[in-house]
């Protein structure tokens, strides 16, 4: 494998590998504290800023007693929280048979979650089936929350955009003592990936694959220019509108499905 050729035992950019979330320590501590306290909270941040990674840390902390369920909504408008919790074979009975209280529910990408479902999940929280709820999305203000649910939310934890040096720290924590990408090159990659942590790490992975193939010692600006040109031609407004309409039509024909992961499945997907 390319990462073995570069001296790594595992892919340093693998999302499932065990890596410390540099610059997120305070956020993780806040989330874990609120879960332990039995609170409902909201994690707010733009796409790719690390919301899901923070939720993974919560799973890692609290898994082991059949009490954690992660729900990835993915803009699924037909989602029914009650059905998710009950499931085809009375999952609520299966989940709560041995432990009738104390469920931790993590709900990711909640942009399209409607008020009916937020009221359902609030009901299960009020009935003590759920100990804590963590919502994650791009905007708390735009979430379809009723006033009664907003009253129960104890904290809105915001993930701010990373600074250059924080992105470099994250990269260096992945690469260790192997200086495959210099700080200056990393800073340039970060800019060209719109300062988005997820895209930044994906780009660094692709560039490391490239130098593995070419047997070069490190990533150069020529590699970056080749794979991630600095100037990108912007689409004309009319063309952009057509592309958006085409994408929307395609999504309606093939709606994204709800992804629900219960604790017994976590080991396969999360660290």
Image: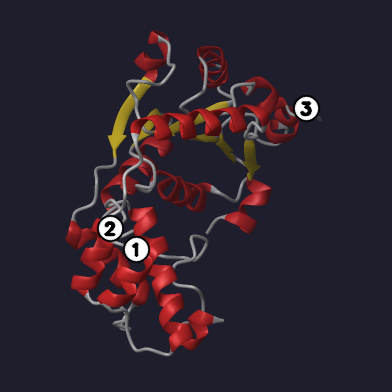
Give the structural element (helix, strand or loop) at label 2: helix
Comparing labels 3 and 2, the label whose residue is closer to the camera: 2
Callout 1: few (<14), some (14-19), or many (20+) C-alpha neighbours within 10 Å? some
Q: CA distance from mark 3 to mark 2?
A: 48 Å
Q: Is residue 98 left or right of residue 144?
A: right
Viewer-proximal residue among 143 and 124: 143
Are circles 3 and 2 on residues that touch, CB within 8 Å? Answer: no
The answer to whether residue 214 is seen in the rendering is yes
Question: Percent position (x, y) of residue 29?
Answer: 32, 47
The residue positioned farthest toward the right in the image shown: 89
Comparing labels 3 and 1, the label whose residue is closer to the camera: 1
Q: Is residue 70 left or right of residue 56?
A: right
Which of the numbered marks, if any, corresponds to residue 228? 1
Q: Earlier in the sequence, mark 3 or mark 2?
A: 3
Q: Which residue is mark 2?
A: 192
Q: Earlier in the sequence, mark 2 or mark 1?
A: 2
Give the structural element (helix, strand or loop) at label 3: loop
Question: Percent position (x, y) of residue 84?
Answer: 67, 28
Which of the numbered marks, if any, corresponds to residue 205? none
Question: Percent position (x, y) of residue 258?
Answer: 63, 34
Q: Is residue 14 left or right of residue 157?
A: right
Q: Which residue is mark 3?
A: 90
Quadrant in which residue 246 is drawn: top right
The residue positioned farthest toward the top in the image shown: 147
**231 w.r.t. 43: above or below:** below
Viewer-proximal residue among 10 and 266: 10
The answer to whether residue 37 is seen in the rendering is no
Are circles 2 and 1 on residues that touch, CB within 8 Å? Answer: yes
- Residue at image position (46%, 65%) is 18
């Amino acid at each position: 494998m390319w990462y073995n050729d570069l001296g790594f035992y595992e892919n340093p950019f693998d999302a499932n590998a065990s890596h410390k979330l540099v610059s997120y320590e305070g956020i993780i501590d806040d989330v874990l504290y609120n879960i332990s306290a039995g609170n409902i909270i909201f994690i707010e941040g733009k796409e790719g800023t690390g919301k899901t990674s923070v939720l993974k840390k919560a799973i890692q902390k609290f898994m082991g007693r059949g009490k954690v369920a992660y729900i990835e909504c993915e803009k699924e408008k037909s989602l029914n929280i009650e059905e998710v919790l009950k499931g085809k074979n009375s999952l609520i009975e299966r989940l709560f048979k041995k432990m009738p209280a104390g469920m931790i529910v993590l709900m990711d990408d909640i942009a399209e979650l409607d008020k009916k479902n937020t009221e359902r999940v609030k009901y299960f929280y009020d009935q003590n089936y759920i100990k804590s709820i963590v919502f994650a999305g791009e905007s708390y203000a735009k979430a379809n929350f009723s006033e009664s649910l907003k009253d129960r939310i104890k904290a809105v934890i915001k993930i701010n955009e990373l600074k250059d040096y924080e992105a470099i720290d994250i990269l260096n924590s992945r690469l260790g003592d192997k200086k495959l990408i210099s700080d200056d090159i990393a800073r340039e990659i970060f800019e060209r990936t719109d300062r988005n942590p997820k895209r930044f790490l994906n780009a660094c992975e692709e560039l490391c694959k490239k130098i593995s193939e070419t047997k070069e010692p490190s990533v150069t600006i020529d590699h970056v220019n080749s794979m991630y040109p600095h100037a990108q031609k912007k689409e004309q407004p009319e063309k952009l509108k057509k592309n958006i309409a085409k994408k929307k039509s395609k999504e309606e024909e093939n709606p994204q499905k709800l992804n629900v992961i219960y604790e017994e499945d976590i080991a396969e997907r999360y660290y």
